[in-house]
Amino acid sequence: MLYLNPDNFILKPALATIHCEPNWKWRKRDAPMPNYDLFYVWNGEGTLWLNKKPYKIGKGHCFLFKPGDWTEATHNPQNPLVLTYIHFDVESNVKLIPSSHRIIKNRIAFESLLSQYVRLFLVETFGAEIEGKLILKQIMIHLLREEYEQQEEKVQDEPEDVSNNLLETILEIANYIQQHPGKTHTIESLAARANLSPRYFSKKFKQIVGHTVKSYIVYSRIKRAEHLLHNCGMTVTETAYALGYNDLHFFSRQFKQYTGKNPSEIR
């Protein structure tokens, strides 16, 4: 899909970002997948079967289901899935299709693209279909780029392979940051929580998450700010203070840096 013209994408109305109910299940269909479906996990844990192959899924897992695929899934009711799905078709022969499953490394950039796409279709938006096709092309490029870069890094990083325990520790810290975006997080306090030295923690956090600790803290705050402004009716001032900002202008500047918009435009 690297060389596919954006006009060749056929957008489908089936798209959303959802917080799955505790009793949610994705039951096996009577027929295989009729089109492409981009499926991304923001949070939670569960199991997904793709063509009878099971995958333990959690934050950052991304699937690209293809026509003819068989899918089903369940999740942990105590840690329900938060996911985005986007259905689409293409009207030409496709080459360089992203792999069916991967764990996204550069989540900030990827999640920003997903949010932009879904937001386009929340209400009737001028030029939404044209922009949506452009964003969908960017998403496909992102997946292919990560695939290429991870193949290159696999050989280079082999001597420093990350253990499962360290991986789980770092991902737990990333999840903790997202769950408590308003806290005054520091590298020292987070490293202590992980029982690691600040320097080693910072290095491994960037290696695993794909971003520095500080940039991830800011990203988590801005992501939560978008939700509070758009869905909870909070004012810009209330949102800023709820997320630990004492300087309203600094909050607005950081918000625009990450989203391209002023906070007042989201409400």
Image (spheres, rainbow, N blue to C red):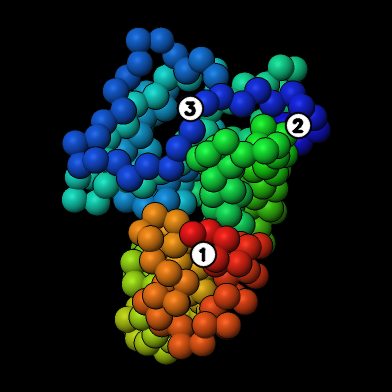
Q: Which residue is mark 1?
A: 209
Residue furthest to the top: 31
- How far is mark 2 from mark 3, CA to CA? 19 Å
Query: Is label 1 in contact with label 3 (beta carbons under 8 Å)?
Result: no
Along the polypeptide, which appears first: circle 1 or circle 3? 3
Image location (x, y in percent) of residue 181 = 39, 73
Q: Indicate whether 235 appears above or below 77.
A: below
In the rendered image, is residue 7 in sight?
Answer: yes
Q: Tell me which residue sits at (44%, 14%) in the image.
A: 32
Q: Are marks 2 and 3 in contact (CB under 8 Å)?
A: no
Question: Which residue does the image show at 57% across and 61% down from the upper left?
Answer: 265
Q: In the image, residue 180 lies at what x, y percent? A: 34, 72
What is the spatial separation of the Cα atoms under label 2 and label 1, in whole angstroms? 30 Å
Amino acid identity at mark 2: Pro
| Residue 155 appears in view | no
**Counting other residues with Cα less than 10 Å from the Cα at mark 3, is it few (<14), some (14-19), or many (20 or more)?**
few
In this rendering, the label closer to the viewer, 1 or 3: 3
Q: Give the labeled residue for mark 3.
A: 14
Closest to the camera, between mark 2 and mark 1, is 2
Query: Residue 48: where, in percent of width, then height?
Result: 35, 34
- Dot 1: element: helix
Instruction: Name which residue type carries label 1.
Output: Val
Q: Compared with residue 160, is residue 202 higher up or lower down, i.e. above or below?
A: below
- The 10 Å Cα crowd at callout 1, few under 14, some 14 to 19, many 20 or more, is many
What label does residue 1 carry, if any? none
Tell me where residue 107 sits by quadrant: bottom right
Relative depth, front residue between 130 and 219: 130
| x 42%, y 51%: residue | 42
Q: In which quarter of the view is residue 227 placed?
A: bottom left
Which of the labelled discs sits on residue 6, or is there none?
A: 2
Question: Distance from label 1 to label 3 (Cα)?
Answer: 29 Å
